[in-house]
């Protein structure tokens, strides 16, 4: 029995490694291409003869990535901040007060999750134009918050129900803490795992958002990374070295974010998805 189990474990490990290596192939080609000089015409599978960083500086200047990075960072940061604050505040009473209204509100949030965001594009575009919010970071932030609020509330509410014991809150109230004080002093510090999950899911999507940014952020001064790269890729399709370098610069911040938060990601996602 032990021998069979060991063979099965070894087989699954080999399969997992094979899948991992398969997914790493595009990143390997991306790196070898980005660090090659323009005069290096060797195969994309071969490491550069001489590692060069010129492509990165040229791509940064040519694509105006500095301005695009600033816009994307601002939009991602404030969208994530509002999602965490508003989403956790909305989820707390839905998780703790099982009134009929709260149950309907919770089901409403869950039902909204199945609606594709693009279905609201036409009426949303008309509304944005009427309000004069075209080509502003504010509309991008509000749109991202609205898009991810249902998922945020769902994960926070599930995590609070399944992980945080009510006795902690009751003890805080006995000590004289208000409801809002209990939330911020007792409950919110314990939401770190699910907050990490929400940050990774929402920030990666917001950082890479193209479908809404291309409609609402068309001016050069408010272009995000994806919109800037789209035009850059089109005009440099024959220069794969620059394209690869720009792609690495664009993906690097989210890769770093995931590395810092990965230990909390699975725990928070699993606990936060528990049905309430």
Image (cartoon, rainbow, N blue to C red):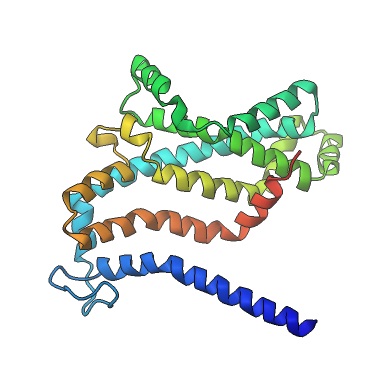
Quarter of the rendering occupied by the C terminus:
top right
Quarter of the rendering occupied by the N terminus:
bottom right
Residue 140, by quadrant, is top left
Q: Residue at x 21, y 56 (%)?
A: 59
Q: Residue at x 27, y 47 (%)?
A: 229
* Residue 28 x, y percent position in the rendering: 36, 70
Instruction: Say whether residue 154 is left or right of residue 170.
Output: left
Q: Give the residue at the far left of this rendering.
A: 39
* Residue 48 x, y percent position in the rendering: 24, 76
Instruction: Say whether residue 274 is left or right of residue 149.
Output: right
Instruction: Say whether residue 29 is left or right of residue 273.
Output: left
Looking at the picture, tell me which residue is in the foreground, 235 or 144: 235
Can residue 123 be seen at all in this image of the molecule? Answer: yes
Please determine whether, in this image, residue 42 is positioned above or below residue 162.
below
* Residue 23 x, y percent position in the rendering: 45, 65
* Residue 169 x, y percent position in the rendering: 81, 39
Q: Give the residue at the far bottom of this rendering.
A: 3
Q: Residue at x 55, y 36 (%)?
A: 83
Q: Residue at x 62, y 73 (%)?
A: 12
Please determine whether, in this image, residue 170 is positioned above or below residue 105.
below
Instruction: Say whether residue 94 is left or right of residue 261.
Output: right
Looking at the picture, tell me which residue is in the foreground, 262 or 234: 234
Please determine whether, in this image, residue 149 is positioned above or below residue 25.
above
């Amino acid at each position: 029995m032990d021998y069979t189990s060991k063979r099965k474990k070894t087989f699954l490990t080999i399969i997992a490694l094979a899948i991992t290596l398969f997914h790493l192939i595009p990143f390997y080609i991306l790196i070898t291409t980005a660090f090659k000089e323009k005069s290096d015409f060797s195969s994309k599978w071969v490491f550069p003869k001489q590692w060069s960083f010129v492509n990165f500086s040229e791509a940064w200047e040519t694509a105006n990535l500095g301005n695009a990075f600033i816009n994307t960072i601002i939009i991602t940061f404030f969208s994530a901040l509002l999602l965490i604050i508003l989403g956790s505040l909305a989820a707390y009473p839905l998780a703790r007060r099982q009134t009929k209204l709260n149950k309907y509100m919770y089901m409403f949030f869950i039902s909204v999750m199945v609606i594709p965001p693009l279905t609201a594009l036409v009426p949303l575009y008309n509304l944005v134009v009427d309000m004069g919010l075209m080509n502003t970071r504010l509309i991008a932030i509000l749109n991202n918050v609205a898009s991810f609020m249902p998922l945020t509330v769902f994960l926070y509410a599930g995590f609070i129900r399944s992980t945080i014991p009510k006795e902690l809150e009751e003890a805080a109230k006995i000590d004289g803490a208000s409801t809002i004080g209990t939330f911020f002093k007792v409950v919110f510090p314990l939401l770190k795992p699910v907050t990490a999950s929400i940050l990774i899911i929402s920030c990666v999507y917001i950082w890479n958002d193209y479908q809404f940014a291309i409609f609402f952020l068309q001016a050069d001064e408010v272009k995000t990374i994806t919109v800037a790269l789209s035009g850059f890729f089109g005009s440099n399709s024959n220069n794969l070295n620059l394209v690869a370098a720009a792609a690495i610069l664009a993906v690097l911040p989210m890769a770093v974010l995931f590395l810092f938060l990965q230990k909390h990601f699975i725990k928070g996602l699993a606990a936060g998805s528990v049905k309430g």
